[in-house]
Image (cartoon, rainbow, N blue to C red):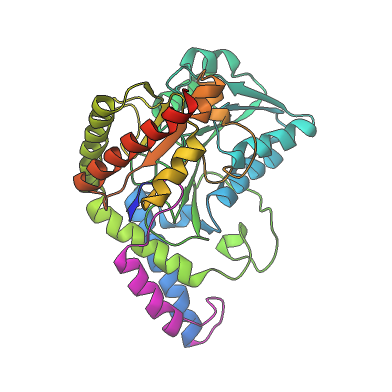
Amino acid sequence: MIYLDNCATTRLRKEVVEIMQRSMIEDFGNPSSLHRLGMKSEQKIKSAREHIANFLNVDKNEIYFTSGGTESNNISIQSITNKLKKRGNHIITTKIEHPSVLNIMKNYEQQGFNVTYLNVDIQGYISLEELKDNIRNDTILVSIMHVNNEIGSVQPVSKIKDIIKKINPNTLFHVDGIQGFGKVELDLKKWEIDCYSFSGHKIHGPKGIGGLFIDKKHSLLPLVFGGNQERGLRSGTENLTGIIGFGEAVRVMNESHKIESNYVIELKEYFARKIETEIPYIKFNTSLDKNSSPYIINISFKHVRGEILLHYLENKEIYVSTTSACSSKGTEKSHVLKSIGLGNEEIEGSIRFCFSYENTIEDLDYTVKVLKESVEDIRQITMR
Protein backbone atom coordinates (compact mmCIF):
# COMPACT_ATOMS: atom_id res chain seq x y z
CA MET A 1 0.00 0.00 0.00
CA ILE A 2 1.16 3.51 -0.86
CA TYR A 3 -0.60 6.15 1.21
CA LEU A 4 -0.48 9.68 -0.23
CA ASP A 5 -3.53 11.16 1.50
CA ASN A 6 -1.78 12.44 4.62
CA CYS A 7 -3.64 15.78 4.52
CA ALA A 8 -6.87 13.90 5.22
CA THR A 9 -5.36 11.95 8.10
CA THR A 10 -2.13 10.22 9.05
CA ARG A 11 -1.19 6.78 10.29
CA LEU A 12 -0.45 6.62 14.02
CA ARG A 13 3.21 6.46 14.95
CA LYS A 14 4.27 3.22 16.63
CA GLU A 15 5.13 5.10 19.82
CA VAL A 16 1.66 6.65 19.88
CA VAL A 17 -0.08 3.28 19.46
CA GLU A 18 1.96 1.76 22.27
CA ILE A 19 1.34 4.54 24.78
CA MET A 20 -2.39 4.64 23.98
CA GLN A 21 -2.73 0.87 24.38
CA ARG A 22 -1.16 1.09 27.85
CA SER A 23 -3.31 4.08 28.69
CA MET A 24 -6.58 2.31 27.86
CA ILE A 25 -5.68 -0.41 30.34
CA GLU A 26 -4.00 1.60 33.08
CA ASP A 27 -5.29 5.19 32.93
CA PHE A 28 -9.01 4.79 33.49
CA GLY A 29 -9.40 7.21 36.39
CA ASN A 30 -11.41 10.40 35.80
CA PRO A 31 -8.93 13.33 35.83
CA SER A 32 -11.39 15.28 37.99
CA SER A 33 -11.48 12.62 40.73
CA LEU A 34 -9.60 13.35 43.95
CA HIS A 35 -8.20 9.85 44.51
CA ARG A 36 -4.85 8.54 43.27
CA LEU A 37 -6.22 7.16 39.99
CA GLY A 38 -7.74 10.53 39.16
CA MET A 39 -4.59 12.39 40.12
CA LYS A 40 -2.53 10.02 37.96
CA SER A 41 -4.79 10.76 34.96
CA GLU A 42 -4.58 14.47 35.65
CA GLN A 43 -0.79 14.23 35.68
CA LYS A 44 -0.83 12.50 32.29
CA ILE A 45 -2.83 15.39 30.84
CA LYS A 46 -0.41 17.87 32.37
CA SER A 47 2.52 16.01 30.79
CA ALA A 48 0.88 16.04 27.33
CA ARG A 49 0.11 19.74 27.68
CA GLU A 50 3.75 20.42 28.54
CA HIS A 51 4.99 18.47 25.49
CA ILE A 52 2.82 20.62 23.23
CA ALA A 53 3.68 23.88 25.00
CA ASN A 54 7.39 23.08 24.75
CA PHE A 55 7.08 22.39 21.03
CA LEU A 56 5.26 25.67 20.43
CA ASN A 57 7.48 27.55 22.91
CA VAL A 58 4.51 28.89 24.85
CA ASP A 59 3.22 28.67 28.42
CA LYS A 60 1.46 25.39 29.25
CA ASN A 61 -1.54 27.36 30.52
CA GLU A 62 -2.02 28.76 27.00
CA ILE A 63 -2.77 25.28 25.60
CA TYR A 64 -6.33 23.90 25.63
CA PHE A 65 -7.50 20.49 24.46
CA THR A 66 -10.52 20.15 22.15
CA SER A 67 -12.14 17.38 20.10
CA GLY A 68 -10.27 18.42 16.95
CA GLY A 69 -9.43 21.20 14.54
CA THR A 70 -13.05 22.02 13.72
CA GLU A 71 -13.89 22.64 17.36
CA SER A 72 -10.69 24.64 17.88
CA ASN A 73 -11.66 26.92 14.99
CA ASN A 74 -15.21 27.25 16.32
CA ILE A 75 -14.12 28.11 19.84
CA SER A 76 -11.64 30.71 18.61
CA ILE A 77 -13.86 32.49 16.11
CA GLN A 78 -17.14 32.30 18.01
CA SER A 79 -15.63 33.19 21.39
CA ILE A 80 -13.79 36.20 20.01
CA THR A 81 -16.77 37.39 17.97
CA ASN A 82 -19.26 36.96 20.79
CA LYS A 83 -17.00 38.76 23.23
CA LEU A 84 -16.07 41.69 20.98
CA LYS A 85 -19.34 42.23 19.10
CA LYS A 86 -20.07 45.42 21.05
CA ARG A 87 -16.83 46.85 19.69
CA GLY A 88 -17.58 46.07 16.05
CA ASN A 89 -19.19 43.63 13.63
CA HIS A 90 -16.56 43.30 10.91
CA ILE A 91 -14.54 40.09 10.34
CA ILE A 92 -11.90 39.38 7.72
CA THR A 93 -11.07 35.94 6.34
CA THR A 94 -10.16 34.49 2.93
CA LYS A 95 -12.01 32.70 0.16
CA ILE A 96 -9.93 29.53 0.57
CA GLU A 97 -10.56 28.71 4.22
CA HIS A 98 -11.62 25.31 5.53
CA PRO A 99 -15.41 24.75 5.82
CA SER A 100 -15.08 24.85 9.62
CA VAL A 101 -14.22 28.54 9.20
CA LEU A 102 -16.33 29.49 6.18
CA ASN A 103 -19.52 28.01 7.62
CA ILE A 104 -19.05 29.97 10.85
CA MET A 105 -18.67 33.12 8.77
CA LYS A 106 -21.90 32.35 6.88
CA ASN A 107 -23.66 31.98 10.22
CA TYR A 108 -22.40 35.35 11.44
CA GLU A 109 -23.40 37.02 8.18
CA GLN A 110 -26.94 35.77 8.80
CA GLN A 111 -26.74 37.45 12.21
CA GLY A 112 -25.87 40.78 10.59
CA PHE A 113 -22.08 40.72 10.78
CA ASN A 114 -20.05 42.09 7.89
CA VAL A 115 -17.53 39.54 6.62
CA THR A 116 -14.80 40.39 4.09
CA TYR A 117 -13.44 37.45 2.09
CA LEU A 118 -9.97 38.21 0.75
CA ASN A 119 -9.13 37.08 -2.78
CA VAL A 120 -6.11 34.94 -3.59
CA ASP A 121 -3.85 34.83 -6.63
CA ILE A 122 -3.33 31.86 -8.96
CA GLN A 123 -1.07 30.16 -6.41
CA GLY A 124 -3.37 30.74 -3.46
CA TYR A 125 -1.73 33.72 -1.73
CA ILE A 126 -3.62 36.72 -0.38
CA SER A 127 -2.73 40.28 -1.31
CA LEU A 128 -1.31 42.15 1.68
CA GLU A 129 -2.48 45.38 0.05
CA GLU A 130 -6.06 44.10 -0.07
CA LEU A 131 -5.76 43.15 3.60
CA LYS A 132 -4.54 46.67 4.45
CA ASP A 133 -7.42 48.23 2.54
CA ASN A 134 -10.03 46.20 4.40
CA ILE A 135 -9.01 46.58 8.05
CA ARG A 136 -11.36 49.08 9.67
CA ASN A 137 -12.03 50.58 13.07
CA ASP A 138 -14.83 48.06 13.61
CA THR A 139 -12.74 45.01 12.52
CA ILE A 140 -12.72 42.71 15.53
CA LEU A 141 -11.16 39.58 14.03
CA VAL A 142 -8.95 38.39 11.19
CA SER A 143 -9.00 34.61 10.70
CA ILE A 144 -6.60 33.19 8.11
CA MET A 145 -5.42 29.66 7.42
CA HIS A 146 -1.64 29.24 7.66
CA VAL A 147 -1.30 26.33 5.18
CA ASN A 148 -4.09 25.63 2.72
CA ASN A 149 -5.26 22.04 2.94
CA GLU A 150 -5.87 21.59 -0.81
CA ILE A 151 -3.00 23.37 -2.55
CA GLY A 152 -0.45 23.94 0.23
CA SER A 153 -0.03 27.71 -0.08
CA VAL A 154 1.60 29.16 3.07
CA GLN A 155 0.28 32.59 4.00
CA PRO A 156 2.80 35.17 5.35
CA VAL A 157 1.38 35.08 8.87
CA SER A 158 4.06 37.29 10.41
CA LYS A 159 3.51 40.05 7.84
CA ILE A 160 -0.25 39.76 8.25
CA LYS A 161 0.03 40.34 11.98
CA ASP A 162 2.32 43.34 11.45
CA ILE A 163 -0.30 44.91 9.20
CA ILE A 164 -3.13 44.24 11.68
CA LYS A 165 -1.13 45.65 14.59
CA LYS A 166 -0.22 48.79 12.66
CA ILE A 167 -3.73 49.62 11.41
CA ASN A 168 -5.94 48.38 14.26
CA PRO A 169 -4.12 46.89 17.28
CA ASN A 170 -7.48 46.01 18.85
CA THR A 171 -8.18 43.46 16.09
CA LEU A 172 -7.49 39.88 17.16
CA PHE A 173 -5.78 37.38 14.87
CA HIS A 174 -6.77 33.71 14.67
CA VAL A 175 -4.71 31.26 12.63
CA ASP A 176 -6.00 27.89 11.45
CA GLY A 177 -2.75 25.95 11.75
CA ILE A 178 -4.14 22.48 11.24
CA GLN A 179 -2.17 21.67 8.07
CA GLY A 180 0.90 23.63 9.15
CA PHE A 181 1.43 22.42 12.72
CA GLY A 182 4.84 20.74 12.90
CA LYS A 183 5.32 21.03 9.13
CA VAL A 184 6.22 24.65 8.37
CA GLU A 185 7.99 27.42 10.27
CA LEU A 186 6.00 28.86 13.17
CA ASP A 187 6.66 31.28 16.03
CA LEU A 188 3.46 32.09 17.91
CA LYS A 189 4.99 34.60 20.31
CA LYS A 190 7.23 36.43 17.87
CA TRP A 191 4.43 36.65 15.33
CA GLU A 192 1.98 37.74 18.07
CA ILE A 193 -0.77 35.31 17.10
CA ASP A 194 -3.75 35.53 19.45
CA CYS A 195 -5.31 32.10 18.78
CA TYR A 196 -3.93 29.09 16.91
CA SER A 197 -5.83 25.88 16.08
CA PHE A 198 -4.18 22.49 15.55
CA SER A 199 -5.12 18.82 15.45
CA GLY A 200 -3.78 15.41 16.47
CA HIS A 201 -4.59 13.23 13.49
CA LYS A 202 -2.65 15.39 11.01
CA ILE A 203 0.66 14.69 12.82
CA HIS A 204 0.47 10.89 13.25
CA GLY A 205 -1.57 11.22 16.43
CA PRO A 206 -5.11 10.04 17.20
CA LYS A 207 -8.38 11.32 15.78
CA GLY A 208 -10.89 13.05 18.01
CA ILE A 209 -8.36 15.27 19.76
CA GLY A 210 -7.24 18.78 18.92
CA GLY A 211 -5.51 21.72 20.48
CA LEU A 212 -5.95 25.44 20.79
CA PHE A 213 -3.39 28.06 21.76
CA ILE A 214 -4.83 31.22 23.30
CA ASP A 215 -2.43 33.97 24.29
CA LYS A 216 -2.67 34.42 28.06
CA LYS A 217 -3.51 38.09 27.70
CA HIS A 218 -6.93 37.03 26.39
CA SER A 219 -9.86 35.51 28.25
CA LEU A 220 -12.31 33.92 25.84
CA LEU A 221 -15.92 32.96 26.48
CA PRO A 222 -16.85 29.25 26.55
CA LEU A 223 -19.33 27.81 24.08
CA VAL A 224 -20.16 24.80 26.28
CA PHE A 225 -20.83 24.98 30.01
CA GLY A 226 -20.36 22.17 32.50
CA GLY A 227 -17.74 21.05 34.98
CA ASN A 228 -15.16 23.71 34.08
CA GLN A 229 -12.58 21.35 32.57
CA GLU A 230 -9.85 23.05 30.50
CA ARG A 231 -10.02 26.01 32.88
CA GLY A 232 -13.67 26.57 32.02
CA LEU A 233 -13.22 27.06 28.28
CA ARG A 234 -14.13 23.54 27.20
CA SER A 235 -16.17 21.63 29.78
CA GLY A 236 -16.64 17.87 29.62
CA THR A 237 -14.68 14.85 30.80
CA GLU A 238 -11.37 14.89 28.98
CA ASN A 239 -10.49 12.46 26.19
CA LEU A 240 -7.67 11.10 28.31
CA THR A 241 -6.33 8.44 25.95
CA GLY A 242 -6.52 10.83 23.01
CA ILE A 243 -4.69 13.54 24.94
CA ILE A 244 -1.95 11.11 25.97
CA GLY A 245 -1.55 9.94 22.36
CA PHE A 246 -1.54 13.54 21.11
CA GLY A 247 1.15 14.49 23.61
CA GLU A 248 3.29 11.55 22.57
CA ALA A 249 2.88 12.39 18.87
CA VAL A 250 4.11 15.92 19.58
CA ARG A 251 6.97 14.66 21.76
CA VAL A 252 8.24 12.47 18.92
CA MET A 253 7.61 15.20 16.35
CA ASN A 254 9.65 17.64 18.42
CA GLU A 255 12.65 15.36 17.96
CA SER A 256 12.15 14.54 14.30
CA HIS A 257 10.15 17.23 12.49
CA LYS A 258 13.10 19.11 10.97
CA ILE A 259 14.66 15.94 9.56
CA GLU A 260 11.30 14.72 8.29
CA SER A 261 10.45 18.07 6.71
CA ASN A 262 13.77 18.19 4.82
CA TYR A 263 13.19 14.63 3.64
CA VAL A 264 9.66 15.42 2.43
CA ILE A 265 10.95 18.49 0.55
CA GLU A 266 13.14 16.12 -1.47
CA LEU A 267 10.20 13.79 -2.08
CA LYS A 268 7.99 16.60 -3.36
CA GLU A 269 10.67 17.98 -5.68
CA TYR A 270 11.43 14.50 -7.03
CA PHE A 271 7.75 13.71 -7.57
CA ALA A 272 7.07 17.00 -9.38
CA ARG A 273 10.05 16.55 -11.74
CA LYS A 274 9.14 12.96 -12.54
CA ILE A 275 5.47 13.72 -13.18
CA GLU A 276 6.40 16.65 -15.41
CA THR A 277 8.73 14.42 -17.41
CA GLU A 278 6.47 11.39 -17.69
CA ILE A 279 2.94 12.76 -18.10
CA PRO A 280 1.89 15.47 -20.60
CA TYR A 281 -1.02 17.92 -20.34
CA ILE A 282 -0.86 18.55 -16.63
CA LYS A 283 -1.03 21.70 -14.51
CA PHE A 284 0.56 22.17 -11.10
CA ASN A 285 -1.90 23.97 -8.85
CA THR A 286 0.66 24.13 -6.03
CA SER A 287 3.62 26.45 -6.03
CA LEU A 288 6.82 24.40 -6.31
CA ASP A 289 8.98 26.91 -4.45
CA LYS A 290 9.58 27.29 -0.71
CA ASN A 291 6.44 29.38 -0.25
CA SER A 292 4.27 26.27 -0.22
CA SER A 293 4.08 23.30 2.12
CA PRO A 294 6.52 20.50 1.30
CA TYR A 295 3.81 18.03 2.25
CA ILE A 296 1.22 18.94 -0.41
CA ILE A 297 1.08 18.99 -4.20
CA ASN A 298 -2.10 19.45 -6.24
CA ILE A 299 -2.09 18.58 -9.96
CA SER A 300 -4.73 18.84 -12.68
CA PHE A 301 -4.67 16.14 -15.36
CA LYS A 302 -6.34 17.40 -18.51
CA HIS A 303 -8.98 15.22 -20.18
CA VAL A 304 -9.24 13.14 -16.99
CA ARG A 305 -11.82 13.13 -14.21
CA GLY A 306 -10.06 13.14 -10.88
CA GLU A 307 -12.58 10.85 -9.23
CA ILE A 308 -12.07 8.20 -11.91
CA LEU A 309 -8.30 8.52 -11.66
CA LEU A 310 -8.50 8.20 -7.87
CA HIS A 311 -10.23 4.82 -8.23
CA TYR A 312 -7.75 3.64 -10.85
CA LEU A 313 -5.00 4.34 -8.31
CA GLU A 314 -6.96 2.77 -5.49
CA ASN A 315 -7.19 -0.47 -7.46
CA LYS A 316 -3.37 -0.50 -7.37
CA GLU A 317 -3.31 0.19 -3.60
CA ILE A 318 -2.35 3.86 -4.05
CA TYR A 319 -4.44 6.26 -1.98
CA VAL A 320 -4.88 9.95 -2.87
CA SER A 321 -7.73 12.47 -2.79
CA THR A 322 -9.50 14.90 -5.09
CA THR A 323 -10.28 17.60 -2.50
CA SER A 324 -10.52 18.27 1.22
CA ALA A 325 -11.60 15.13 3.06
CA CYS A 326 -14.11 17.16 5.08
CA SER A 327 -16.02 18.15 1.95
CA SER A 328 -15.18 15.34 -0.49
CA LYS A 329 -18.63 13.78 -0.34
CA GLY A 330 -20.38 16.96 -1.38
CA THR A 331 -21.43 17.80 -4.92
CA GLU A 332 -19.91 21.28 -5.01
CA LYS A 333 -16.65 21.82 -6.86
CA SER A 334 -13.65 22.84 -4.77
CA HIS A 335 -14.03 26.46 -3.65
CA VAL A 336 -10.25 26.63 -3.29
CA LEU A 337 -9.55 25.67 -6.89
CA LYS A 338 -12.30 28.03 -8.08
CA SER A 339 -10.68 30.84 -6.11
CA ILE A 340 -7.29 30.39 -7.82
CA GLY A 341 -8.99 30.72 -11.20
CA LEU A 342 -9.24 27.13 -12.44
CA GLY A 343 -11.91 26.18 -14.94
CA ASN A 344 -14.31 23.29 -14.49
CA GLU A 345 -12.19 20.82 -16.46
CA GLU A 346 -9.08 21.63 -14.43
CA ILE A 347 -10.99 21.36 -11.17
CA GLU A 348 -12.60 18.06 -12.13
CA GLY A 349 -9.20 16.68 -13.17
CA SER A 350 -7.35 17.61 -10.00
CA ILE A 351 -5.68 15.20 -7.60
CA ARG A 352 -4.08 16.08 -4.25
CA PHE A 353 -0.98 14.15 -3.16
CA CYS A 354 0.07 14.54 0.48
CA PHE A 355 3.37 13.10 1.66
CA SER A 356 4.79 11.91 4.97
CA TYR A 357 8.07 10.63 6.39
CA GLU A 358 6.83 7.09 5.65
CA ASN A 359 6.88 7.54 1.87
CA THR A 360 9.89 6.52 -0.19
CA ILE A 361 11.36 7.30 -3.61
CA GLU A 362 10.37 3.78 -4.65
CA ASP A 363 6.78 4.57 -3.66
CA LEU A 364 6.81 7.64 -5.87
CA ASP A 365 8.39 5.83 -8.82
CA TYR A 366 5.63 3.23 -8.68
CA THR A 367 2.96 5.90 -8.24
CA VAL A 368 4.13 7.81 -11.33
CA LYS A 369 4.24 4.57 -13.33
CA VAL A 370 0.66 3.72 -12.38
CA LEU A 371 -0.45 7.33 -12.87
CA LYS A 372 0.97 7.41 -16.38
CA GLU A 373 -0.72 4.14 -17.33
CA SER A 374 -4.02 5.20 -15.77
CA VAL A 375 -4.07 8.65 -17.34
CA GLU A 376 -3.28 7.20 -20.76
CA ASP A 377 -6.04 4.61 -20.36
CA ILE A 378 -8.62 7.23 -19.33
CA ARG A 379 -7.60 9.64 -22.08
CA GLN A 380 -8.01 6.95 -24.71
CA ILE A 381 -11.68 6.93 -23.75
CA THR A 382 -12.29 10.64 -23.11
CA MET A 383 -10.36 11.93 -26.13
CA ARG A 384 -11.99 9.71 -28.77
Res. 116 in view: yes
At a point 36% along the width and 50% down the height, the residue shown is: 316
At a point 52% along the width and 41% down the height, the residue shown is: 324
Q: The N terminus is located in which quarter?
A: bottom left
> Residue 204 in the image: x percent, y percent?
37, 57
> Residue 33 in the image: x percent, y percent?
56, 81
> Residue 121 in the image: x percent, y percent?
47, 17
At a point 42% along the width and 74% down the height, the residue shown is: 43
> Residue 142 in the image: x percent, y percent?
57, 30
Q: Is residue 13 left or right of residue 237?
A: left
At a point 60% along the width and 26% down the height, the residue shown is: 92
Quarter of the image for residue 270 reads: top left
Residue 8 falls within the magenta-colored stretch = yes
Q: Is residue 349 left or right of residue 52?
A: right
Between residue 212 and residue 137, name the one nearer to us: 212
Quarter of the image for residue 14 reads: bottom left
The magenta-colored residue range is: 7-35
Is residue 206 depicted above or below 182 in this figure?
below
Between residue 290 and residue 66, name the one nearer to us: 290
Residue 254 falls within the magenta-colored stretch = no
Between residue 54 and residue 344, name the one nearer to us: 344
* Residue at the front extreme, as displayed: 384
Res. 320 in view: no
How many numbered callouts?
0
Q: Is residue 183 left or right of residue 131?
A: left
Between residue 38 and residue 95, name the one nearer to us: 95
